[in-house]
Image (cartoon, rainbow, N blue to C red):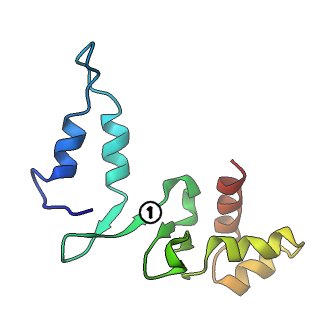
Amino acid sequence: AQRAGEGSPDEQVVKGLIVPRSGQYVFKDIVAHYLKQIRFGDDKFAEMIRLPQYGAADVVLDPYRGYGQPVFDRSGAKVADALGPLRAGETFEAVAEDYGVTEAELRDALDAIAA
């Protein structure tokens, strides 16, 4: 995805979401909020997307880390890799230390996966 600032294609798409029958705008706020989760590089192309469903865990999709799978932004650990030991019975404390995340981040990630 490419962004060009004011008047960019993403802004025009958000402004143009209407219900044909009633002419009412739909999902405008939701779509606008989601588009704000995308970080663009100097070349104006998307370089990372924050995944809000992970709550405070600050999980992102970054093509340069995790091979496109969700990763914890701060540590770079893949979410699936960190949750595996939890499923195997490791404690939140031990996994958090091993993967460079907080216990709260692990809990939010686990909640997002379970939803």
Q: Nearer the viewer, residue 33 or 7?
A: 7
Snapshot quadrant of residue 38:
bottom left
Q: Amino acid at mark 1?
A: Arg
Instruction: Say few, some or many: other residues with alpha carbon within 10 Å of mark 1 (under 14 / 14 to 19 / 20 or more).
Output: many
Q: Nearer the viewer, residue 2 or 71?
A: 2
Q: Is residue 14 left or right of residue 101?
A: left
Residue at 21% across / 63% down in the picture?
A: 2
Residue at 69% across / 67% down in the picture?
A: 106
Is residue 18 placed above or below 7 in the rendered structure? above
The picture places residue 24, in percent across and down from the top left corner, at 26, 20
The picture places residue 93, in percent across and down from the top left corner, at 79, 77
| Outermost residue to the left | 7
Q: Nearer the viewer, residue 105 or 19?
A: 19
Q: Nearer the viewer, residue 60 or 103?
A: 60
Count the marks: how many?
Answer: 1
The picture places residue 112, in percent across and down from the top left corner, at 65, 54
Residue at 63% across / 77% down in the picture?
A: 101
The picture places residue 26, in percent across and down from the top left corner, at 32, 28
Q: Is residue 5 left or right of residue 29?
A: left
Snapshot quadrant of residue 13:
top left
Disc 1 on helix, strand or loop?
strand
| Outermost residue to the top | 22
Task: For the N terminus, give its image quadrant.
Answer: bottom left
| Outermost residue to the bottom | 98
Q: Is residue 65 left or right of residue 2?
A: right
Which residue position holds label 1?
Answer: 50
